[in-house]
Image (cartoon, helix red, strand yellow):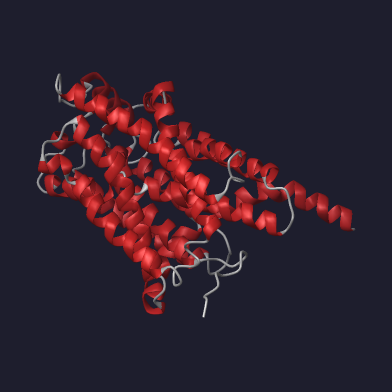
Amino acid sequence: MRLQPVALDERVEAIDLMRGFALLGILLINMLAFHSPLYYTDPYTWFDAPGDTATFSFLDVFIQASFYPLFAMLFGYGLGIQFLRAEARKKTFAPMAAKRLSVLLAFGILHAFLIWYGDILITYAVMGFLLIGMIRLDSKWLLWLGIIIYAVPQTLLLLIMFAAVALDSSFYVGIQEVQNSIAAYGGGTFAEIFRQRFDDWMYGNNPLNYIILIVTILPFTMVGAAAAKWRLIERAKELKKMWIGLAAGGLIIGLLLKLAPYIFEPNIAMTYLQEIFGGPLLAVSYAAIIALLAQNAGISKLLRPLSKAGRMSLTTYITQSVIATTIFYSYGLGLYGQVSLLTGTLMALGIFAVQLIFAEIWLTKFSQGPLEMLWRKITYGLNLEKSNKSNN
C-alpha cells in the first residue's frame, strides 16, 4: 500500500523537531561570539582555560557550520510549503510571501543593531526574496541549480585558500579589534556598544562577504524548497531507505571533512573545507536522523519539548540573543571576555533548558510564540480587518 503524505494544513512534528534541534546548535555555537571577540581571534588558540580544548573540538566538529545550513534548508522548506498551500487554494503566493519576509527583515534589523550583531534574519529575508523568484521552478531544477550555485564558487574559493596557505597559513588576529570589543561590550555605554555592534555587523556583512553569503545560504533554501515540493519529510516512512542513506552517508563523509583540520593542520583552507563542505553534509545527516526518529511514537513524545521550541523558532532565536547579551554586556552582568568556553557552553545549555520550559508553558495557552503572533498580526492584520469589514 502506498503511504500518503499528511495534508498541507497539518503540522509536521518532524519539522518542528528539526527547528528545535537547529536552535540548540545555533545557540551553542553563537555563544562563542556572545561572550568573546570570536571574529578577530584564532579560535584554536584563543580558548585555553581547562576544559576549553576538548569543548572547542566538540563544537568545531559536531556543531560549527552544521546548524545554520539545517536552519536555512528548513527556511526554504517552509517557503516551499507556503507556496504549495497558496497553489492549492488558488491564491497568489508572491505578494503575501514578500510581506511576511519584509516583516522578518524588520525583525532582523532591530535584532542586528539593537541586540546582537550576529543576526541571520536579515540574510534569510534577503534569500527569501530571491527564492520567491525561483519558487515556481521544477523541484529538480531547484535542487541542481542550488547545488551548482553552491559548489562552483565554493570550490574556487577553496582552491584560492589552499594557494594562499602556501604563503601564509595563519589566522587573522585583530589585537585592536579584540581590545575594542572587550572595552565596549564588557564596560561601555549603550552608545559605545551600539557603535561596536555596528562595526562588527559591517565586518561580517561587507559587500564581498555578502556575495559569499548569497552563494552559501541561498542554495540551502533552494534545496529546502525542492524537498518541500517533493514532501520529503512528510513522506519519511515511504522514503525510509533514502533517509537512512542520507543519514549514514552524510554522517560518515561529513565527519571526515569536519575532522580535516585535526587530521592535517588547522589553517584557513582546512577550516574552510571543514565548514563549507563538511558542515552541510552533517546537517543533512542530522535532518535525516530526526526524520527517522520522529516516526517512532515513543521517541517523538520524548522529544516533544524540543519540537515546541521549534514551533516558536523566531521567539526562541531572538530571546537567546536577549538573554545572552544581558548576561555578557555591560548593561547586564558585564561578563564579556571573562568566561571560559566550557563555562559559556554550559550556560548555553542552561539558557536552552529555560527556553524549553517557557515554550512548554506558553504553548499550553497559545498556539504560537509571542513574536510569531506579532509577526502574523503585522503580516495579516490589515488583510483580516479588510476581510471582516467586507463580510459585515
Residue 64 visible to an observer of this rendering: no
Q: Is residue 336 above or below residue 383?
A: above
- Horizontally, residue 122 falls left or right of residue 56, namely right
Residue 336 visible to an observer of this rendering: yes
Image location (x, y in percent) of residue 19:
43, 56
Which of these two is toward me, 278 or 382?
A: 278
Task: Please state, as top left, top right, bottom left or bottom right, where the C terminus lies in the image.
Answer: bottom right
Image quarter of residue 116:
top left
The total number of labels drawn is: 0
Q: Is residue 10 above or below residue 50?
A: below
Q: Residue at x 58, y 56 (%)?
A: 81
Image location (x, y in percent) of residue 185:
33, 31
Q: Residue at x 38, y 79 (%)?
A: 298
Q: Is residue 239 above or below residue 100?
A: below
Which of these two is toward me, 255 or 312?
A: 255
Image location (x, y in percent) of residue 372:
57, 53
Q: Residue furthest right?
A: 392
Q: Is residue 109 above or below residue 7?
A: above
Q: Residue at x 61, y 68 (%)?
A: 7
Image location (x, y in percent) of residue 366:
58, 64
Which of these two is toward me, 218 or 308?
A: 218
